[in-house]
């Protein structure tokens, strides 16, 4: 009965007129694989690899341990896309051996890709472990860097991937407004984009994601955030490349329709949200999603954006 209530309760994500939007899972480690498979995820859209590094914050985990863990994830999704994000340390995820202790503003400091470029051996070891784990497996491995600010960052990451002998697509997360504004230039270096809307909201509104009092500014329905999503998605379309969303925004079924209307090509979320997003998407055409997206962008607040999108999607 519950399945019936959800409508399209399995199968690939798509609008009612058949525009495909792969629904992928965000995972934090092999422990999340069972739920992702159960939910019918079409692959992994964000594997946060930080957990591997949290056991011992004094040193990187041995390569063998990394290889074993990556293989577990890759073998769970044969013939599917698996997007692995390299270590995103710093700010809300500090690691003793990487994160400077004395930064005045850790969220604006040496974090994500910045810290990996300062410790190239840590990045190289992770990329080599991924290359080794994927060897001989029938997967579509994609590897992306967090906190890419510009083309120079994207090139440095792509160079590191090539040096590690990685046979995979290399991508950049769009989490900093500069990356959305200059997405086309970043796409000269990498093959795909993935929007991290949690950090993108934080940096767009100068609102620390860990400060609850600023929740209004962290709301992914903020029209300014939708504008940046549209910029990145349009750039990817112009370059013939993909642009997914892997931040919390993708887990909101109504917003998932709006993101689709903005031109986002895949949605990655916690496994628990997949069924509801799949069912909601299946109720609307791509044209309706596009109209909802336009209505949301025309609003002046997150609240009004949501209301406007809801009106478009329920009125038709
Ligand atoms: C994001 O910032 O939206 C994201 C997906 O990465 P994380 O939440 O791990 O920072
Ligand atoms: Mg992030």
Image: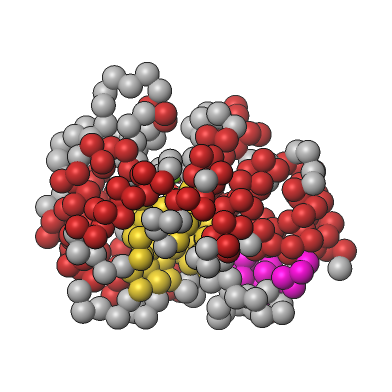
Looking at the magenta stretch, what is its main secondary structure? helix
Q: Which residues are magenta?
A: 273-288
Q: x%, y% of residue 152? A: 36, 44
Q: Is residue 126 left or right of residue 88?
A: left
Q: x%, y% of residue 125? A: 16, 53
In the image, 25 versus 205, the foreground residue is 205
Quarter of the figure that contains the N terminus: bottom right
Residue 93, magenta (yes or no): no
**Visible in this render: residue 220?**
no
Q: x%, y% of residue 291? A: 79, 61
298, above or below 293, in the image: above
Quarter of the figure that contains the C terminus: bottom right
- Residue plotted at (24% across, 65% down): 166
Asked which quadrant contains residue 289, the reply is: bottom right
Q: x%, y% of residue 142? A: 36, 65
Asked which quadrant contains residue 311, the reply is: bottom right
Asked which quadrant contains residue 302, the reply is: top right
- Residue plotted at (66% across, 46% down): 227
47, above or below 114, in the image: below
Q: Is residue 210 left or right of residue 105?
A: right
């Amino acid at each position: 009965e519950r399945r019936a209530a959800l409508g399209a309760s399995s199968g690939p994500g798509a609008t009612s007129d058949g525009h495909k939007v792969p629904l992928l899972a965000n995972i934090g480690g092999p422990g999340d694989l069972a739920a992702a498979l159960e939910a019918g995820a079409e692959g992994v859209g964000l594997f946060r690899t930080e957990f591997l590094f949290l056991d011992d914050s004094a040193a990187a985990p041995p390569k063998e341990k990394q290889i074993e863990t990556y293989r577990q994830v890759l073998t769970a999704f044969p013939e599917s896309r698996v997007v692995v994000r390299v270590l995103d340390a710093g700010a809300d995820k500090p690691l003793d051996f990487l994160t400077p202790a004395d930064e005045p503003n850790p969220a604006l400091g040496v974090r994500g890709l910045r810290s990996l470029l300062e410790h190239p051996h840590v990045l190289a070891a992770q990329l080599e472990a991924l290359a080794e784990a994927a060897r001989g497996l029938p997967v579509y491995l994609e590897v992306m860097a967090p906190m890419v600010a510009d083309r120079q960052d994207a090139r440095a990451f792509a160079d590191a991937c090539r040096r590690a002998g990685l046979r995979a697509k290399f991508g950049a997360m769009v989490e900093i407004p500069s990356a959305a504004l200059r997405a086309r230039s970043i796409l000269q270096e990498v093959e795909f984009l993935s929007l991290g809307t949690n950090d993108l909201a934080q940096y767009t509104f100068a609102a620390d994601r860990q400060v609850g009092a600023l929740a209004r500014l962290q709301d992914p329905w903020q029209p300014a955030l939708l504008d940046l999503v549209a910029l990145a998605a349009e750039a990817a379309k112009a370059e013939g490349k993909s642009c997914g969303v892997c931040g919390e925004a993708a887990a909101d079924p109504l917003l998932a329709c709006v993101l689709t209307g903005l031109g986002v090509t895949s949605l990655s979320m916690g496994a628990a949200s997949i069924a509801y997003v799949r069912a909601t998407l299946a109720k609307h055409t791509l044209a309706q999603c596009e109209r909802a997206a336009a209505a949301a962008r025309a609003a002046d607040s997150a609240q009004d954006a949501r209301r406007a999108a809801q009106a478009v999607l329920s009125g038709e």
